[in-house]
Image: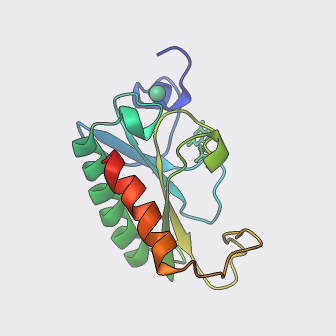
Amino acid sequence: MASCIFCEIVANRQPASFVYRDELCAAFMDIQPVTRGHLLVIPNRHAAFLVELDPRVGGHLFAVAQRLAQALRESEVRCEGINLFLADGTVAGQEVFHVHLHVIPRHRGDGFGLRFPPDYGRRPPRHELDAVAESIRAAL
Ligand code: 5GP
Ligand code: ZN
């Protein structure tokens, strides 16, 4: 994989402030944190998108993120809550095409948040939810 910044970090060819490493994954400080303490957890082996990621490695990323979330809560970082966030695809906000799970410490008044579409708040009727569920189930 040519010129993937996260692969370069895993290979120690680019600097990073690591908090955790093992044979499957690495966690380090985001270079442009949303809040102080913002971490990224990545697989050591390159996978651009979720579809390319071994689900066992995906599970491991989540388990490590859980540990990091607890460490953040116990550290001096201001952390009254946590968001785990993963952008898969450009339209979802992905900018670095090597899978990464954001671990973002939250505190009251931090200014971060989600923006919802204008029709958010409408509750679709059950038959509509059932139809969508059926189409997704069929694809499993
Ligand atoms: P995405 O939008 O793809 O979910 O998030 C990419 C994240 O990677 C951003 O939060 C950005 O600040 C972070 N990032 C981009 N380049 C680097 C880098 O070279 N080092 C580190 N530590 N983080 C990076
Ligand atoms: Zn990579």
Can the viewer see residue 74? Answer: yes
Can the viewer see residue 93? Answer: no
Residue occupying image coordinates x 27% and y 37%: 54
Residue occupying image coordinates x 52% and y 14%: 2
Q: Residue furthest right?
A: 118
Residue occupying image coordinates x 53% and y 33%: 15
Q: Residue furthest top?
A: 2
- In the picture shown, does residue 80 fall above or below 3? below
Residue occupying image coordinates x 39% and y 54%: 136
Q: Is residue 46 left or right of residue 64?
A: right
- In the picture shown, does residue 76 fall above or below 48? below
Nearest the eye: 120 or 11: 120
Ligand 1 occupies quarter = top right
| Image location (x, y in percent) of residue 30 | 57, 50
| Image location (x, y in percent) of residue 39 | 49, 55
Q: How many marks?
A: 0
Q: Is residue 113 left or right of residue 129?
A: right
> Which scheme is used to colour this image of the protein?
rainbow
Nearest the eye: 127 or 22: 127
| Image location (x, y in percent) of residue 24 | 26, 38
Q: Quadrant of residue 114?
A: bottom right
| Image location (x, y in percent) of residue 96 | 58, 36
- In the picture shown, does residue 62 fall above or below 82? above
Q: Is residue 126 left or right of residue 44?
A: right
- In the picture shown, does residue 12 fall above or below 41? above
Q: Residue furthest front?
A: 127
